């Protein structure tokens, strides 16, 4: 029992330490000292403060992000006593800052490699056994996948989306 809990506990402590260090070491926020121009030279420009309620564009926050679905599913074997006990099949997406979606596809092979390593480690620690869809397990997995994505793509990665998840016992 301890052998199964120890890796999950260590991953949780490591992830918590990383988050704590990130929060402690983050830079101070930059003050926005821009002065709005009275007249823009850009055609079709509208002052965001005025909004465009008639067109339905009331300053949506979704305009500055994009969702990128990775092309192929991830297949992860769950090994127990040196035998494949089940297979986990997942589809993943990445929420990124607008304009970064082309970079996701350019770096997809490296992303897939990093994601597979995280998924294999998660499987080897028992993350796909028992109640593998409970929110704590999924949060730990999403956090680890996000760290890998940010390491490859930068801080423009907002979150990891698990769009499909299935486990097939063999």
Image (cartoon, rainbow, N blue to C red):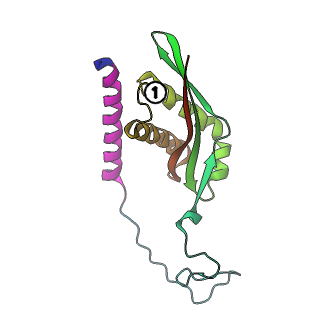
Figure quadrant of residue 51: bottom right
Percent coordinates x, y for residue 38 in the rendering: 57, 90
Q: How many marks?
A: 1
Quadrant, the N terminus: top left
The residue at the point 63 percent across, 45 percent down is: 69
Question: Can you identify the residue that label 1 sits on?
Answer: 128
In the picture provided, is 69 more to the left or to the right than 148? Answer: right
Residue 12 on the magenta segment: yes
Q: Secondary structure at mark 1?
A: loop
The percent position of residue 34, horizontal first and vertical second, equals 49, 79
Q: Residue at x 47, y 25 (%)?
A: 123
Task: Spot the residue most to the left.
Answer: 2
Q: Looking at the picture, does residue 31 appear above or below residue 68?
A: below
Pick the front one: 40 or 117: 117
Crowding at mark 1 (Cα within 10 Å: few <14, some 14-19, many 20+): many
Above or below, comparing residue 2 to residue 33 in the picture = above
Q: Residue at x 68, y 80 (%)?
A: 42
Range of magenta residues: 4-27
Q: Position of residue 59 (x, y in %)?
A: 55, 74
**Which residue sits furthest bottom?**
38
In the image, residue 8 above or below residue 44: above
């Amino acid at each position: 029992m301890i052998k199964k809990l120890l890796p999950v506990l260590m991953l949780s402590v490591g992830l918590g330490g990383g988050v704590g260090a990130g929060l402690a070491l983050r830079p101070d926020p930059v003050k926005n000292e821009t002065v709005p121009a009275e007249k823009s030279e850009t055609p079709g420009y509208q002052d965001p403060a005025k909004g465009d309620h008639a067109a339905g564009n009331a300053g949506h926050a979704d305009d500055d992000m994009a969702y990128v679905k990775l092309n192929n599913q991830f297949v992860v074997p769950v090994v127990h006593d040196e035998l494949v006990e089940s297979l986990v099949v997942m589809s993943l997406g990445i929420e990124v800052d607008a304009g970064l979606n082309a970079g996701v596809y350019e770096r997809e092979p490296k992303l897939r490699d990093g994601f597979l390593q995280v998924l294999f480690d998660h499987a080897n620690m028992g993350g796909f056994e028992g109640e593998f869809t409970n929110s704590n397990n999924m949060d730990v997995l999403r956090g680890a996948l996000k760290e890998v994505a940010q390491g490859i793509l930068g801080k423009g990665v907002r979150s990891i989306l698990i769009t499909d998840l299935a486990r097939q016992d063999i």
